[in-house]
Image (tube, rainbow, N blue to C red):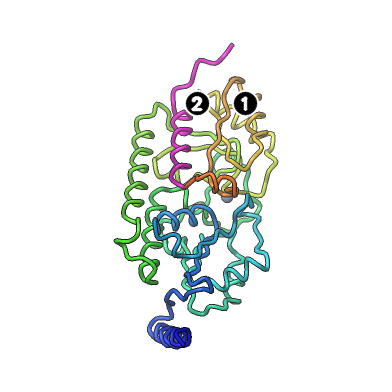
Amino acid sequence: MKKLWKQLLCAGLCLCTLCACGGGGAKPAESGKPRIVATIFPLYDWTRQILGSHAADVDLTLLVGSGADMHSYQPTAEDIVRVSEADLFIYVGGESDEWVEGALKEAVNKDMRVLNLMEMLGGAVREETLLPGMEAEPEEETAYDEHIWLSLKNAFTCCQAIGETLEAMGIVTRRESDLDEYGAKLLELDARYLQAAQSAPLKTVLFADRFPFRYLTDDYGLDAYAAFQGCSAETEASFETVAFLAAKLGELNLPAVLTIESGDGKLAETVVRASDRPGTPILRMDSMQSATAGEIASGAGYLSIMEGNLEVLRQALSAAQAPEE
Ligand SMILES: [Zn+2]
């Protein structure tokens, strides 16, 4: 009897919200909890951190987990079902999310709230640019850089939007959530990055790899050289690119060559070998594009990973050691 009442009440509420603005309230799943689906790890972790002690009150799913790469991700039938039944779906909204439109058309839950973060960020979204020495991508049309989470400022804005949505859905109030505390931590880390960049003797980093860190280097006024634009599908660097990066390494007297977590580092080795600084260390920054279940289980979070990246950045911007003879 109680259940029937609930259903009636829910149907009534849903109708009301449909009339009002088309937005949905949090409709309980069979587990009784609102279902939230986030595509990639940063979005998932932000939501978890904002919910804080209320994280157990929702059914939160990370869609692209287990080491799958967001750029080659294709949803399984099960994933499509998860998305279509969600009360809240949070995604980046870039090139890698072209599958989303089709999945949302299948949506069973017509009251689903959808948060497209690139759309929400609006003017803060940047175009991919071709830096000197980079392998050009074959396509000519303008591509927007979808690695928005690698800016702590964007992370802050995204978290505000997620927090406001959770509040509007009646999942947590702002006071109940950890939004303010988490936002303060993001801004504090942003300030530490700025301080590190401003006080560093060098202002240029060199990625012998793909380059998802454009938002990060832009935020702190750093220059960058890289082998590939964004996360170009291209994996073979030409002789010219290797020669260009090897020359820059020597010319700028850089203390380190950078790679990202998904690569095998072979290109970096080739660049270092081709340079006049063969002892240069190769350091890795984590762009969180393919977080593994193991990393997630071990408690890794967006903030701790970005703190690790700051330490790597500090080393990459420090004065170079005298080259080994
Ligand atoms: Zn990428």
Find disc 1 in the rendering and name its residue.
272
**Residue 276 against residue 49 in the figure, above or below:** above
Q: Whole-percent x and y of residue 179?
A: 35, 56
Q: Is residue 287 magenta?
A: no
Q: Whole-percent x and y of residue 258?
A: 55, 34
Say what amino acid the circle numbered 1 marks. Val
Residue for point 37% across, 42% down? 189
Q: Is residue 7 left or right of residue 98?
A: left
**What's the magenta region?**
302-325
Along the line of sight, the residue nearer the viewer: 275 or 36: 36
Q: Quadrant of residue 245?
A: top right
Residue at the top extreme, as displayed: 325
Q: Main secondary structure of the magenta part?
A: helix
Residue for point 36% across, 71% down? 168
Q: Secondary structure at mark 2?
A: loop
Find disc 2 in the rendering and name its residue.
252
One can see residue 250 in this view = yes
